[in-house]
Image (cartoon, rainbow, N blue to C red):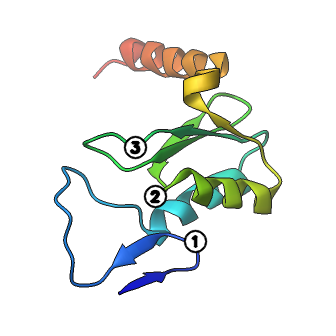
Amino acid sequence: MRWRDRYGLRRRRGLRVAKFDREATDADIEALIEFAKTRRGVEFYVEPETFATDTTAVAVAHDGEWTRRRVGSPAVIAKVARDLSLPVYDVQLTGYPARMRAYNERRRQAQDSDPV
C-alpha cells in the first residue's frame, strides 16, 4: 500500500528496504523551506541518489551559507522551489557555486584562528 505525504514523498507500509541511510522526511523538507525563507538569494542544487543515500538537495544562500537535506526525489525539491519561486539546479550539470566554497574556506580559517 502506497501513500504520499504533503511533500510527495513516497512510502510503503509494511515493506522495509535495506539502505545504509534513512529516507527523506517532512522535517528534511521543512528545514530546507525554513532555510530558504530566512536567507536571501537561496538556490537549490539537487544531488543524485547513491547506493548509500537518498536524493539530497543543497540550499545555498547569497553569502555561501548552505545546508544539505534528503528530499526523496528531484520532483520533490522542484515542487518546493517552484512554490518558493527559487531556482533549482542539477549539481551534476552545474557544479556547486563558488560562493559555497568561499564560505567553507572562511569558516575553516575562522576555526583555525580560534584558540581552543
**Mark 1, residues whose alpha carbon is within 10 Å: few (<14), some, or many (≥20)?**
some
Image quarter of residue 11:
bottom left
- Regarding mark 2 in the picture, which secondary structure is present there? loop
Can residue 33 be seen here?
A: yes
* Vertical comparison of 44 with 112: above or below: below
Q: Which residue is found at the position 72% from the left and 46% from the top?
A: 39
Extreme residue in the bottom direction: 1
Q: How crowded is mark 2: few (under 14 residues within 10 Å), some or many (20 or more)?
A: many
**Residue 96 seen from this side:** no
Q: Which of 54 and 12 is in front in this view?
A: 12
**Residue under circle 1?**
7
Nearest to viewer (mark 3 / mark 1): 3
User: What x and y, as percent, mark residue 21?
Assistant: 24, 52
The residue singled out by tag 2 in the image is: 72
Task: Give the x, y percent position of residue 78.
Answer: 67, 53
Quadrant that contains the N terminus: bottom left
Of the two numbered discs 3 and 1 on the same chain, state the one appearing first in sequence.
1
- Image vertical order of residue 18 relative to residue 89, above or below: below
- Residue, x 72% and y 54% (percent of image)? 81
Separation of disc 1 and disc 2 at Cα?
10 Å
Residue nearer the viewer, 36 or 29: 29
Q: Which residue is drawn at 48% across and 71% down?
A: 26
Residues at discs 1 and 2 in contact (Cβ within 8 Å):
yes
Q: Residue 40 carries which label?
A: none
Sequence-wise, which precedes: disc 1 or disc 2? 1
Q: Name the residue under label 3.
A: 49
Q: Where is residue 48 in the image (x, y as percent from the top left)?
A: 46, 39
Q: Is residue 2 above or below residue 45?
A: below
Tag 3, which secondary structure? loop
User: Amino acid under label 2?
Assistant: Gly
| Quadrant of the image occupied by residue 38 | bottom right
